[in-house]
Amino acid sequence: MPKHIPSTTSIALQPHQVIIKPLLTEKGIHRSTRCNAYAFQVNPLATKGDVRSAVEELFEVKVEKVRTQHRKGKPRRTKMRFGYTQDWKKAIVTLDPEHHIELF
């Protein structure tokens, strides 16, 4: 069952706590070259504003828009046990055309 995450949080997250890791996938690299959009795994408590300010501060770029997704965990099996991987949050950040992140 997915856990309910409250929409309003009183927790102030630091930029290094918001972005967990960049998502380096084939689709993400294609998106970064064509659309100047980059994907990150972010803290589930982070809002779009938190993600925007964290990317601007950590990578020194200008963000145009942020789209977020809540991704459900996938079913997994180990020997005779069944379980699920952890639910996570994904953010797709579109940058200003004159900015670029060299990480990708």
Image: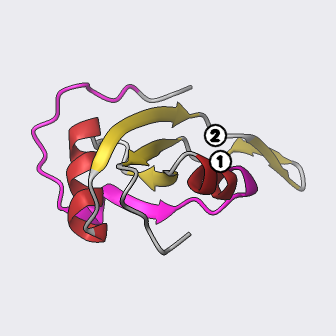
Q: Which of 51 and 12 lies nearest the eye of the viewer?
A: 51
Which quadrant: the C terminus? bottom right
Residue located beneath label 2 in the image? 73
Rendering quarter of residue 79:
bottom right
Residues at marks 1 and 2, CA–CA distance in whole angstroms: 5 Å
Assess disc 1: are there few (<14), some (14-19) or many (≥20) residues with their C-alpha within 10 Å of its C-alpha: few
Q: Percent from the top left, x then y, of residue 33?
A: 61, 57
Residue drawn at (34%, 37%) of the image: 65
Residue drawn at (72%, 40%) of the image: 74
Q: Secondary structure at mark 1?
A: loop
Residue type at numbered disc 2: Gly
Residue located beneath label 1 in the image? 85
Q: Are marks 1 and 2 in contact (CB under 8 Å)?
A: yes
Q: Which of 40 and 99 lies nearest the eye of the viewer?
A: 99
Q: Of label 1 and label 2, which has the lower sequence position? A: 2
Task: From this view, report whether residue 31 is shown above or below residue 54.
Answer: above
Residue range in magenta is 4-27
Which quadrant: the N terminus? top right
Q: Is residue 103 visible?
A: yes
Task: From this view, report whether residue 49 is shown above or below residue 27.
Answer: above
| Side (left or right) of 39 relative to 50 | right
Q: How is the image coloured?
A: secondary structure
Residue type at numbered disc 1: Thr
Q: Is residue 47 visible?
A: no
Residue drawn at (41%, 62%) of the image: 20
36 part of magenta stretch: no
13 part of magenta stretch: yes
Figure disc tally: 2
Q: Percent from the top left, x then y, of residue 75?
A: 76, 39
Residue drawn at (17%, 27%) of the image: 8
| Side (left or right) of 71 relative to 6 | right
Work out which residue is located at the far bottom of the displayed protein and give it: 102
